[in-house]
Amino acid sequence: MQEYFAARVKYPAPSYSVPVLLTLLQNARVFAPEDVGIRNILIGAGRILWLGESEPELGLAGISRVDLRGRRVVPGFIDGHAHVTGGGGESGFASRVPPVPLSRFTRAGVTSVVGVLGTDDTTRDTRALLAQTRALREEGMSAWCHTGGYHLPPVTLIGSVRDDIVHLDPVIGVGEVAISDHRSSQPTLDEILRVASDVHVAGLITGKAGILHLHLGDGGRGLQMIRDALATTELPARVFNPTHINRRKALFDEALELAKSGCFVDITAFPVAEDDDGLPADVALLKYLDSDSPADQITISSDGGGCLPVFNDQGELTEMDIGNPQSLADTLQALLDGGAALQRVLPAFTSNVATLLRLHDKGRIATDAAADLLVLDDAHRISDVMLGGVWHVRDNQQQVYGQFESRQNSHSALNTQDSKTQHPDMDKPRMIKPRIDKQ
């Protein structure tokens, strides 16, 4: 088993995970994302092997039993929009945000992530994004990325959008392509349609997501270009995937109507000031679910590592914040603190995203699904994170770090969560190191 695990994740398994062949989670209150009640979950080889009310009859040694005593277990979050290489760069080279380390995702409950490029797709390109995506995979994260960035024609690796998606395993779509934004390339409808056509066909060839992930700015044109695309072509609505729909209330209202046409629309979990025209992610999700738009076509992403800028009338950056994956966990906690039913809001973080991205073994708790699981405490915070059958966070303590992380730097500037969700008293970090093959 140790040799299998090491081969699967491409580095030696940490000592705390291997002599255990199987893990049995007992008495878990399972939200899959629907509430299925108290269940026992048997995990092995990174997958859910068995799920049932009674315990399976096991006569094997090497079984780790964890009694959760009724605590809630939910699927790991799928963050469909994160700047894994770091974003920024809109106020000079020194404003480039550094890459987001592994533990910043896992501590926030993110077990799958899709990397994107933003405004700066010049000093950062698809090569860099693909390399960082593969690095996260080597550290145990389930990671994918899009090709291209804000601007058209898109920056690709092989030479075309279609070829990048077909021939590069981690690449599943295009984005984030900017529209209704002064930083965009001001694309025409024909340019958008050509890219959308290529990404759709690539998705058909490969079975990948095949989506055009669209950044929405503050411009008054809003979602008009997507409506025009749907009105004038035969392309399926699911190909067009707008994000940041909650940045303006009028834009959000547009998105409610667009979702009825078949598009998946994405809320960003960014901070919203009281005098801002935007909607906080928890408020936006409830407003969407209270509407007559399809409940299975709404998702939430973090924009982790991205620049959250404020511009003046001349298009000059006046201040910026940094997106944080922790915003997903904070949004879920805010929803539950406000009395929302977990099974109602959870799909936007999990199963809806998996459906959009065609990740068939993610976002759900079921037999043969990936063993990506979160445990919630009584205060609706994430206390434990399992990724591919390995505990990355256990009893509020980080167990696995990225290659260049440590306990000291894992709470760097990217981590803006408040003190109630930080765990500064972690034991010695158990850092996974890459395999060094002897010659």
Image (cartoon, rainbow, N blue to C red):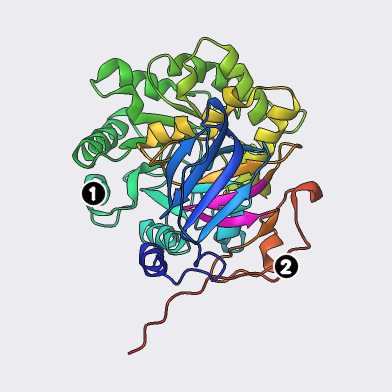
Is residue 240 found left or right of 83 in the rendered image? left
Viewer-side residue, 433 vs 57: 57
At x 46%, y 45%, the residue is 57
Residue range (magenta) = 383-394
Q: Nearer the viewer, mark 1 or mark 2?
A: 2
Residue 410 is at least partly visible in this image: yes
Instruction: Answer whether labels 1 and 2 touch (C-beta < 8 Å).
Output: no
Badge 1 or badge 2: first in the primary sequence: 1
Query: What amino acid is at disc 1?
Result: Ser
Relative horizontal placement of residue 288, taking residue 258 as reference (left or right): right
Picture coordinates of residue 217, whole percent (x, y)? 53, 33
Mark 2, residue position = 427
Residue 327 shows in the view = no
Measuring from the top left, give residue 17's x and y in whole percent: 53, 64
Residue 224 position within the rendered picture, expressed as x and y whole percent measured from the top left: 42, 20
Name the residue rendered at 44%, 18% in the picture. 259
Residue drawn at (51%, 48%) of the image: 111
Q: Which residue is mark 1?
A: 160
Secondary structure category for the residue under label 1: loop
Residue 382 falls within the magenta-colored stretch: no
Q: Cα distance, mark 1 to mark 2?
A: 47 Å
Question: Which residue is at the front of the view, 220 or 388?
Answer: 388
Q: Quadrant of the C terminus?
A: bottom left
